[in-house]
Image: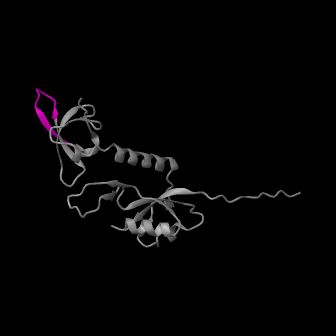
Amino acid sequence: MSLRIWVTVMNIMNWYVIQAKPQKEDFLCQQLRVRGIEVYFPCIRVKPVNPRARKMKPYFPGYMFFQMDLSRISPSALRWVPGAVGIVSFGGEPAPISESLIGLLQKRLEELDGAKENPDDLRQGAPVVIQDGPFAGYEAIFDFRLSGTDRVRVLLSLLCNRQIPLEVPAGYIRRINQH
């Protein structure tokens, strides 16, 4: 009597990271999507000095996430996609990224985008609270937005009511509502 074992080949969809050629992230993203590959290319909103410059910048410049079953296509074939350098690998094997990590990253970027106080809406002298970093919980006075960066300068009163200038990411501050 012989025993037959039937093996069902399952689609194992994993997330991976692919490296793009310099300044070709958008192009590579488009090339992968045209091939039916799901892509997650996290970007953050910035306020550049030059008004004609890009308002969205890659969160991981030169890299993006893609999801597919690598048993259906050779990882080396993805190296030849226009704009690609190759898949991030360790020991010659593509490194899978967990679905939960992708979800956490998406959630964190949504929080960053939604939590940002628009420093353009703040006036010099407006009271703010620092929400993150080593000075989290301290109240300060908004001074100004640093040109060309996503940072602001606030004045922090620590000792003897002396105001100390402090540069922090714009997302670290929140306006204090005064009634």
Note whether residue 89 is visible.
no
Residue plotted at (29% across, 36% down): 131
Q: From where the camera sits, is residue 177 visible?
A: yes
Task: Name which residue lies at 20% across and 58% down.
Answer: 49
Residue pictured at 42% horizontal, 58% vertical = 41
Q: How is the image coloured?
A: one colour
- Give residue 29's position: percent from left, percent from top: 43, 65
Q: Is residue 162 magenta?
A: yes
Question: Which residue lies most toward the right here?
Answer: 1
User: For residue 26, which quarter of the picture?
Assistant: bottom left
Q: Residue furthest top?
A: 160
Closer to the camera in the image, 86 or 112: 112
Percent coordinates x, y for residue 150 in the rendering: 25, 50
Question: Horizontal placement of 44 versus 126: left or right?
Answer: right
Q: How many marks?
A: 0
Q: Quadrant of residue 154?
A: top left
Quarter occupied by the N terminus:
bottom right
Asked if residue 148 lies left or right of residue 132, the reply is: left
Residue 28: percent from left, percent from top: 42, 68
Relative height, residue 86 to residue 47 (above, below): below
Q: Position of residue 81 (x, y in %)?
A: 46, 72
**In the image shown, does 89 or 63 lie closer to the viewer?**
63
Q: Residue at x 21, y 61 (%)?
A: 50
Residue extent of the magenta highlight = 156-167
Does the magenta run of residues contain 3?
Answer: no
